[in-house]
Image (spheres, helix red, strand yellow):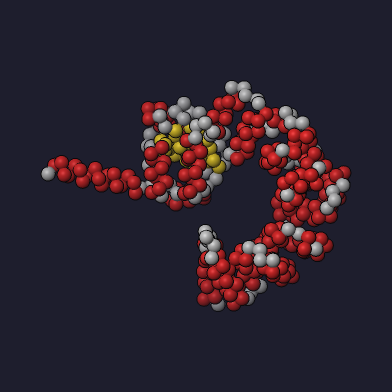
Amino acid sequence: MRKIIILITILISSSYSFSQGIVFFDGSFDKAKELAKTQNKIIFIDCYTSWCGPCKWMAKNVFTDSVVGAFYNANFINYKLDMEKGEGKIAKKDYKINGYPTLLYINGDGEIEHRSLGGCDTAEFIKTGKKALDIENNYGNLLRKYKSGNRNPEFLSEYALSCANLSIPYDINEYFKTQADTELFKEINLILIEWYIVNNNMREFKFLANNIEKFSQLYGKQRVENRVVTIITKSLWHLALQKDPIPLPKAINKIIEPFHFKDSVKIFYKVEMQYYITSKELNWQKYAIIANEYIKTIGIEQIDLSEIYQITNNISKNVSDSIYLKKGIEWCDYLTSKKFQIPEVTLVKARIYKKLGNNIKANEFAQFALTEEQKKTYPRLKEYQNFINELEKQTKKQ
């Protein structure tokens, strides 16, 4: 009888361990490292603060998941540290934690194996854990090779990319010094330019801008043009901080004129639009005005469909002027005629009609968008359903 009771207890305990979420070690940080050494495991540390929204969301929705629990409990010593208290303050300084949540993975010696910044869902969290366990290719191994003196250009590009993906500072000039101009055409170098180059005076930007046609042939016009626009826009942020900043149009021309871009007018408009929604001078009304001028001047047929969608989506969410909301409907109709992302575009159209006060049409297009989204192999229904629910609540109040 006693054996049966013990067996039942074990089964219940086993069942419970598989149904619960992450079990966090309740002891000191040093004890957690000792345990990691004893069990030959990596420590996962949830670096959080009491006021961090994504931290709270993960604690409630991700760490409690049974699949997440099964994976993390089997493979890691799990630990929590409040970055504003006790040992958390020390860890924040030692591991240079500057954003939350930071998902930190260290070994028993306290060395970083992997890290990730920001909240994520259960699938992404498990994926991050698997990367941490890949001791041959994780960030920790790359860091050890770097510290041991490996400065092979191919290795440096891999290390720089890993740092960029994990939001870890790296002096990219160390790598680019190893690359001749002709080598900058390699895709890995375009990727690193996309990640690191933020100033129009940098050699890599000048090379990209002076060879925009060849880069476009190799990697696509939209991708290359967008990178040039982003770097110019970031350069303008610094110009705007000067004591006597020059007017924006003049500042843009000053940067782009030396490169004699074939599509200089197009680039001018794109920079101006991006500036007004990314700088301290945030102004969605000006963005809408410039977007309208841009499409009118360049011609809607000459603009990438994904770019038109981005403009209409931005206007539907951030602009209240009926003139540009109605223009947004016109642009949605154009996208629909090209059969571009029908569910997404139709939802944008529904949002615009809601802003215009026409809830009947808003509901009509939202329901159609939901139906179209449901036809996908992997539909993402939450945004559609949330909008419809919000619309229903608003209609009941009227």
The image position of residue 127, as x and y in percent, is 49, 43
Across the whole image, how many numbered discs are drawn on residues?
Answer: 0
Q: Residue at x 61, y 76 (%)?
A: 361
Residue that extends furthest to the left in the rendered view of this protein: 1
**Residue 115 shows in this picture:** yes
Above or below 318: residue 136: above
**Residue 247 shows in this picture:** no
Q: Residue at x 75, y 34 (%)?
A: 183
Above or below 86: residue 289: below
Q: Residue at x 44, y 34 (%)?
A: 43
- To which quarter of the image does residue 207 belong? top right
Residue that extends furthest to the front in the rendered view of this protein: 218
Residue that extends furthest to the top in the rendered view of this protein: 148
Foreground of the two, 391 or 1: 1
Indicate left or right for 12 with 78 as reference.
Answer: left
Q: Residue at x 51, y 69 (%)?
A: 389
Foreground of the two, 276 or 147: 147
The image position of residue 34, as x and y in percent, is 40, 27
The image position of residue 328, as x and y in percent, is 70, 67
Indicate left or right for 153 with 87 as reference.
Answer: right
The image position of residue 90, as x and y in percent, is 51, 31
Q: Quadrant of the N terminus?
A: top left
- To which quarter of the image does residue 300 belong? bottom right
Q: Quadrant of the C terminus?
A: bottom right
- To which quarter of the image does residue 273 belong? bottom right
